[in-house]
Amino acid sequence: MKQIVAVTSCPTGIAHTLMAAEALKKTAQQLGHGIKVETQGSVGSKNVLTERDIAEADVVLLATDIQIELGRFAGKPVYETRTSEAIVHSREVIEGALALAPGGAPPTPMAKSTMSVPAAEIPVPVKSDSTKVSNARRLVGITACPTGIAHTFMAANALEKAAVALGHTIRIETQGSVGAKNQLTAEEIAAADAVVIAADTKVDLSRFAGKPIYMTGTKAAMHAGQDAINAALTAAPADSSGGRSPDAGSSAEQAKAGRSQTRTGPYKHLMTGVSYMLPVVIAGGLAIALAFAIGGVNAADQPGTLAAALSQIGGATAFHLFVAVLSAFIAFSIADRPGIAPGLIGGMLAQTLGAGFLGGIVSGFLAGYLTKFLSTNIRLPVNLEGLKPVLILPFLSTIIVGLLMIFAIAPPVQALNNGLNNWLNGMQGANRLLLGMILGGMMAFDMGGPINKAAYTFAVGLLASKIYAPMAAVMAAGMTPALGLGLAAFLFKNRFDLEEREAGGPALVLGISFITEGAIPFAAKDPIRVIPALVLGSATAGAISMVMGVQLLVPHGGIFAALIPGAVTHLAYYLIAIAAGTFVTTVALFFLKRPITLPSPAL
């Protein structure tokens, strides 16, 4: 009798993970061997193997579809396969693993194996038996989106799965407004053969100097992870500053990607500004909501009270500052640190001169491109070059941007901003309905992509002008795609495959949290039928919210924002808008999606 320890894992950590675990337990019992199985996935780890379990085991069996940590199995024979193989061919998998145990027969060709080696030398999984471990490469990467929530982690997961499928290993650092997670160490970067950057915001590349770097967006990584991995392994090395080496050769694919990045550059710069702005807006919005909850709508007119202090923190400070932060980090994305000062000052001028968030966007791009132009064209002796980023560039750019904002840019932008605000405040009936439908449809059309972010940025920018209705419409509309899909997957199981039904529960959680990207796994499989249903439901939610005059003071939080007293006006109508949008999405999915034949899994 042999003792086996096993780990099963799939991206969701539900169906395939548990089915593989049960199949392995049943087969091991039939063959007269002992087995302990740890399951891993998005819901966490269950039945975690102890050090004693591993020490007493004769062999380690890994049935996984995602990358897992192998260090704790150092010194043990490791047999690796996929969850599907463990489910369908559990006997062959068990026998193949036991063949690696001391005194076992030669391993079967059913799956790949890793013999006893030190932890630092454990080979990575390979795609197939014909792929040699010597072909395996090590990669590191960064994923980042403006909020650092859904797209960031979905892109990271897609790259990890792609690397495993190609027989490589990858470590991903995730970045966003919530900070950096799983930060790469200097040792990991030094050992890497290539770097993948899947980001919709600016990422500092200086620590990857000398490494081949491939840059793409989060959406491209999610849909074509293997292409990104392969492109990184054939990419040109970076120069000492982390940029591309100018004399390095590049493939046609890389050249095409470079042109695509140039076209989408302004969007990336804008989203970098938005990612740094969001924490300021969220903190300010929550402070204002608390002020209203404590002191009512006249909280700011009660000197010496807690309500007035909160109003000063949120409305008088944070909401006057966030336009400057937006401008500063747009400029930073374009020109790096020398762009921050002119961007910050230009954005503050935009706010104080009445140009609002539109003026902040203009000042950010102006400061960034001007600073970059000056940096390229101002030549100094080598011993004075160090003065450029800290003295010459910030000073010249700040003076030029400031003068242009005061005398040339702010007046017309102020007029445009005032006209927009007056139009929004004066909207009635059909105008409100139309705007709500447009904003709602935009939120659902690409689920976190450029169109979604354009609608969201528009609504957030209006908060500085104390126009709160578009924010309510946008958030209600952004919640309904994932909610509608989650409900439809539960009600109409014959229209969704097993993986989609597994994702239904998480989609509901993401939906109520205002994470529209929860709908992406469904839309990616059947965009022709799913996207129209999502747009229809979100347009309904946005229209109802706008027509009923719902106002929302905070730019994130989903349904949980409604729990804050004063954060939402006309709360009942807000909830009705969300429920109606979800209902319309669900019904539309019933009619648009066709029933499918669901195979029964074989154990």
Image (cartoon, helix red, strand yellow):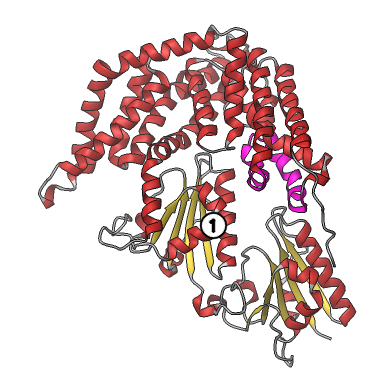
- 501 shown above or below 578: below
- 480 shown above or below 215: above
For image coordinates 66% across by 48% down, the residue present is: 525
The percent coordinates of residue 501 (x first, y second) are 77, 48
Residue type, mark 1 in image: Gly
Is residue 9 in sight in this rendering? yes
For image coordinates 31% across by 13% down, the residue present is: 411
- 558 shown above or below 289: below
- The magenta span reads 497-526
- Say which quarter of the image contains residue 252: bottom left
- Say which quarter of the image contains residue 20: bottom right
Q: Residue 522 colored magenta? A: yes
- 470 shown above or below 190: above
Q: Write down the residue under mark 1.
A: 225
Q: Residues within 10 Å of mark 1 (few under 14, many from 20)?
A: many
* Quadrant in which the N terminus is drawn: bottom right
* Quadrant in which the C terminus is drawn: bottom right
Q: Which element type, helix, strand or loop, lies under badge 1?
A: helix
The percent coordinates of residue 528 (x first, y second) are 65, 40
- Magenta segment main secondary structure: helix
